[in-house]
Amino acid sequence: MKDLTQGSIPKHIIVMAIPIGISMLIQTLYYLVDLYFVGRLGKESLAGVSAAGNISFLILALTQILGVGTQTLIAHAVGRKDQGDANLIFNQSIVLSILLGLLTLLLGYGLGQSYLQTISEDTGTIAEGTTYLYWYIPGMAGQFALVAMSSALRGTGIVLPTMIIQIVSIVLNMILSPILITGWGIGQPMGVAGAGLASSISVVVAVIMLWWYFRQKEKYISYDTAMVKPRFKTWQRMLGIGFPAGGEFILMFLYMAVIYYAIRSLGASAQAGFGLGSRIMQSMFLPAMAVAFAAPAVAGQNFGAKLFDRVKATYHWAAVMSLVIMSFLTLLAYLQPEILVSSFSNDAAAVLIAATFLQMICLNFIASGIIFTCSGMFQALGNTWPAMWSTASRLFTFAIPAIWLSRQTGFQIEQLWVVSVVTVYLQLFISLVLLNKQFKRSLV
């Protein structure tokens, strides 16, 4: 356990954000490595994997429900010096991770293909996406146990073990992907199925390694058979905080699905280009998201200790850091978008669409960084509903005009990016207003 109620706040944020950022980058690399090799298989393969990969937002939503509830309540318990409650939360999170993993397997294999048929009209894209998805679903299911253990450690101020284990995992994925996709050394190429299998194997290995760490090294929180019997009141506490945070990512999944639906008639190149551009954009968000993910642990412990001035200081430092990071990334994406996307695809049309997307969408990077910070503070204060309402407002303001535009004569994909930028700034305004109200309500 690391006490974050003492010492320099910006130092705490940076020390936690660096390994969190590396861990998040490693998680993103699972998908980017697949995209790099899949892009050589053709635009249908790239479009299919991109469309199927959007389901990862839904999985991310469910893991956020579990992870945010686990991290926040453990951070509060650590701030109160209540080790017993921290252990209870950890063990119940393990139980929930198993149940959610089984649910992912059931729904993924049962409804995955139907989802792809809804957002694409290209048969090749649907076939490739379905194949990739079926091989990657076990990896998606394994994410729940990985997030439960990682979030528990983060709530106690510990992030290094997770980072090291995930580095090992992504190296394994980078080795397996070209072997399984192209058949290097084994003589039997699996195509997009190999991409999904490589990611699944890597996630399972990471889960086993992190479980070993808890059994052998971790002392403050640990697995206890007396605490694994379902405690529904504890689940209610966890889900009450985690559900709205997960709801944010469910809304992001719907936001992406709306775009795929709106551009489905433009062909595989359009969907491949958007999928590639959006994944690069999400990768560029990682530094600001790392700061936003570090802030809840720092602010959460101080909130549990009733050190409200330090809670506000955590927000101010995190917001400034996000502003600086996102300003630099905005310039990079605006001036050199082609460099960021050209190596992922041989299809000129897909590359052009991805580069244009980045050059236009980067205008909302700064606003997005501050929104991430606001969401992190809502987590720290134990009320994540305002963050979900903020995200819901964006989905509502974007979806209606996007679908309307897609049905107009002369519709161009760039029109969607203009609507997206405008709606992000509306969301920023709502987030700032709601956070100010939450501060007045909670920090008294």
Image: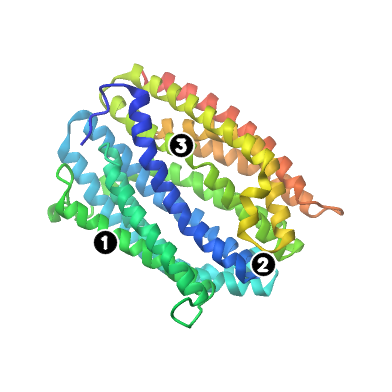
Q: Position of residue 12 (x, y in %)?
A: 33, 28
The residue that disc 3 covers is: 385
Task: Give the label on residue 43, or none.
Answer: 2
Left or right relative to 213: residue 71? right
Judge whether residue 394 can be spotted in this image. yes
Query: How was the colour assigned to the protein in this rendering?
Result: rainbow
N-term-proximal mark, 1 vs 2: 2
Q: Position of residue 399 (x, y in %)?
A: 67, 47
Where residue 121 sits, quadrant-wise, is bottom right
State which quarter of the image contains the N terminus.
top left
Q: Nearer the viewer, residue 79 or 344?
A: 344
The residue that disc 1 covers is: 208
Left or right relative to 70: residue 349? right
Q: Is residue 52 placed above or below 153 in the rendered structure?
A: below
Say what amino acid the circle numbered 3 marks: Trp
Q: Is residue 55 placed above or below 132 in the rendered structure?
A: above
Q: Residue at x 40, y 33 (%)?
A: 383
Secondary element type, mark 1: helix
Q: CA distance from mark 2 to mark 3?
A: 39 Å
Closer to the observer: label 3 or label 1?
1
> Mark 2 and mark 1 in contact (Cβ < 8 Å)?
no
N-term-proximal mark, 2 vs 3: 2
Q: Residues within 10 Å of mark 2 (few under 14, many from 20)?
A: many
N-term-proximal mark, 3 vs 1: 1
Q: Is residue 31 placed above or below 325 in the rendered structure?
A: below
